[in-house]
Image (cartoon, rainbow, N blue to C red):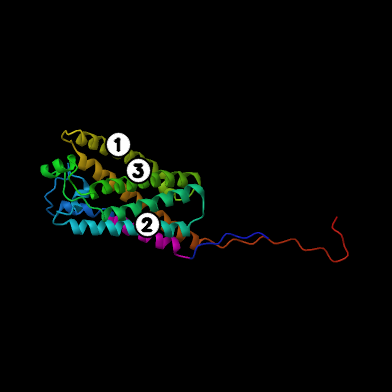
Amino acid sequence: MSVRPTRPAPGARTAAAAVLFLGALAYTAWVLELVIVTGLDPVRAYVSELAAADQPLGGLFRATDLVAGLLVLLGALLALAATRRRPWTTAGLAALALFGAATAVDSRLPLSCPPTSDPVCAARETAGLVPATHTAHAVSSTLAMLGALAALVLLTVAARRYGQWPALARLGPVLVLAELAATAWTMAEIAVLTAGRATWALGVGQRLQVLLVAVYLAVLAGCLARSDTGDRTAPPPVPTPRPADPPQGERAP
């Protein structure tokens, strides 16, 4: 006896979409620096320096990072439960869950000071005199970005391979290429900074990197919500009638 795959409850994908969209909004809380004086140069500073322990608004940005990570983690898990289990989709949503979890952990491991704007902090970091949270923060940030990159690539492949999420299938490749370029830019600037030379625009590259992830999350959320609405408005499938059994005593030709 064949078992039909269970369909998600009505509204399940819409719930996942809403959570992911809120996560995308929380992940862009750093744009507040455009209207709030933070004392950091957005052209040169890491985004995570806004949440450094010695910054006056550090608690605010640590809180928004925590909320963003938890919302993306929850949204990815809800989407996993509400979508058909296909290899590329499942792998992409699992990578998105990794990104959310690592972002939440990252918010609990803040830098003690901003190395790009505080020469004393930079010297202490070079000499290894900063708390171990600096190293732990680098690890969690790397995991978060690897999860984000993997999710963008895998979910874009899923959208195109399975003919689902038309907007993501159309916009995904552009966003992935832009994200890879922003990541290469950021990594090159970090290498220059590590070598002890002045960076050109580390902050711009990293902010673009983070912004593109948020845009991708918003597009994914829209696709999930639209697919849920489409399922609810589509006519129910017509059952295929079974052939009648021949009367007892007669044999089928």
Snapshot quadrant of residue 19: bottom left
- Residue at position x 28%, y 44% in the image: 209
Disc 1 or 2, which lies upstream in sequence?
2
* Residue 121 lies within the magenta run: no
49 in relation to 82, above or below: above
Mark 3 is surrounded, within 10 Å at the Cα level, by few (under 14), some (14 to 19) or many (20 or more) other residues, namely some
Q: Which of 205 and 55 is in front in this view?
A: 55
Q: Residue 175 carries which label?
A: 3
Report which residue position mark 1 lands on: 184
* Residue 14 lies within the magenta run: yes
Q: Which amino acid does label 3 sit on?
A: Leu
- Residue at position x 88%, y 65% in the image: 249
Cα separation between marks 1 and 2? 26 Å
Q: What residue type is labelled 2?
A: Leu
- Nearest to the eye among marks 1 and 3: give it: 1
Point out residue 71 in the picture as x, y percentages from the top left corner.
Answer: 34, 59
Snapshot quadrant of residue 252: bottom right
Mark 2 is surrounded, within 10 Å at the Cα level, by few (under 14), some (14 to 19) or many (20 or more) other residues, namely many
Disc 1 or 3, which lies upstream in sequence?
3
Disc 2 or 3, which lies upstream in sequence?
2
Snapshot quadrant of residue 191: top left
SS state under label 3: helix
User: Magenta part mainly helix, strand or loop?
Assistant: helix
Report which residue position mark 2 lands on: 73
Magenta residue span: 10-26
Q: Which amino acid does label 1 sit on?
A: Ala
Disc 1 to disc 2: CB gap under 8 Å: no
